[in-house]
Amino acid sequence: MIIDVHAHWGPWFFTMDVAAASLATMDRYGIDRAIVSATEAVIYDAPAGNRALAEVLAGQDRLYGYVTINPRRLPEAAADLRELLPSGRWIGVKIHTDYTGSPVTSPQLRDALELAAEAGLPALVHTWGASVLGLAQLCLDTPGLRVIAGHMGADGYAHAIEAANACDRLYLEPCWSHAPAGRIAAVVAAVDDRQLLFGTDATLIDPSSAYGAVAAAGLTAETAERIAWRNAAELFSI
Amino acid sequence: MAFDAWSLIGGLEVALDVDVLVGAYPDRDGPPGTPESVADLLAAHRTRTGAVASLRAALFDMRSGNDEVLALADMRSDNDEVLALAGSAEASRRASSGRPQAGPGWVPVGAVDLRDPIGAGRELDQLAGAGVRAVRLFPDEQGVEAGFPSVRHVARRAAELGLVVLTGGDVRRFWQPFTGLGARVVFLDTHFYHLGDFLVAAAEEPGFHTSTRLLNSPDALETVAAELGAERLLHGSRAPHYEPIVPLLRLATSGLTPDQIAAVAGGNARRLLS
């Protein structure tokens, strides 16, 4: 069993044609379930993208949805949560700090994470470099918030270690198109494995990048199982 | 157990990895890159031959670093034999026959320092005279931009000498100094974000190739094969500083045909470097 906690559905603006490739991409790596956000929602129009994804989620049982929130449009976000959550197919909140111009230091991101905490949903937040440390502070400041540091800081994974150790409600997922040697092993050695999840960034990034990097880390069977699905199943109650 | 990458990779072997380094980066934690450890890493990833360049040459001293990889190649059987065998049926027969293997073979790749274009020109002459067939450029590590005169100078001289250039750097910028020269170039850092730029540049330059290392979107390898032909793709891992299993896994699970996969895994590189 593998649960991908960082995946997408929809087209990208790069030279690629993967809008309909979600399930086939999962199949190539034995990924059973994925929690996806709509690319349109992440990149441009959150309510429109969320509604387009709602139709996809209704038609199958392997994909769960993130309600994507633009922190600059919180009334829209609150409306989306009220409307979409009752279907039971939406189990988290997605926030991309760059596309929405909402860095971890911004007041609107703080407000958006409070909204996620009030809804009782884990929030997947894009992190890069040292920004993951700011996310840890937000997590500490927001009662009840459970937050996933998307990309676990990418090249800032040393900061991600510090962040995860500062807040036990902060989880790390590893996806990145680069796979520098030893990155996953370093994190696994320094962080409680109950805070580690598996994410791929598919269909932007092929799962081979995260899957191969995790495979190279030489995990114990118990830790591999935690990362592959057990922690995600507990976090998202699936 | 979860994340059993080798079950997905199956029987795929790499005949020639075009992106291998010896040496360490002093500005980061990471593997020491001793030749022995790199050889072990390649062998563990079913890689028979590595096109290897020296970080010592790239970061400090061209001559002694290049001597290091030339000496490595001498440690193995004759280098021409290594290249000829890479990806061949004979290599597979030897591997399956139980014949003792001395470890991965090395194809020496010279490195020049773009911060010293005059010295780089002299080193290119030396390398070509020694029978080296490829030279590697490290513009990011050396703080050199694509528009610097040094890059065009080295590109022109390498083309005149018939050397294949393996270059790092952003392909959207580093394509330009190699145009119009009939150059044979492998872009080692082509990221799938920039695939479109590579495709349009390479359409006009038949000598332009790309490493697979960062073409890790769900359809980048397949797109290159469809737009340009799979012969433009060369397997590259950047072992030991990147996880070599990632591009290996991506290639194994790709939508390329078995013949195309074999070509990417070494046949194309052998053709280019012979």
Image: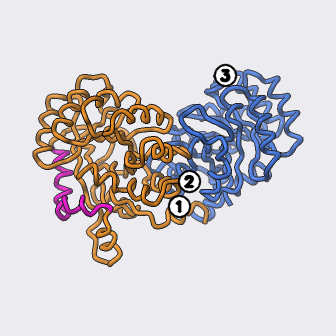
Tell me the residue at 18%/61% (across/down): B75
Residue bearing the label numbered 3: A106
Colour of chain A as rendered: blue
Tell me the residue at 66%/32% (across/down): A137
Image quarter (top left, top right, bottom left or bottom right) of the N terminus of chain B: bottom right
Mark 1 belongs to which amino acid?
A: Ala
Please report contact status of discs 2 and 1: CB closer than 8 Å, yes or no. Answer: yes
Quadrant of the rendered structure where residue A221 is? bottom right
Dot 3: chain letter: A
Nearest-to-viewer mark from 3 and 2? 2
Residue B5 disc label: 1
Q: Main secondary structure of the magenta part?
A: helix
Colour of chain B as rendered: orange
Mark 3 belongs to which amino acid?
A: Ser
Question: Could you say which is closer to the camera, residue B192 or residue B136?
Answer: B192
Confirm whether circles 3 and 2 share one chain.
yes
Few, some or many C-alpha atoms within 10 Å of disc 2 (few <14, some 14-19, many ≥20)? Answer: many
Mark 2 belongs to which amino acid?
A: Tyr
Residue bearing the label numbered 2: A211
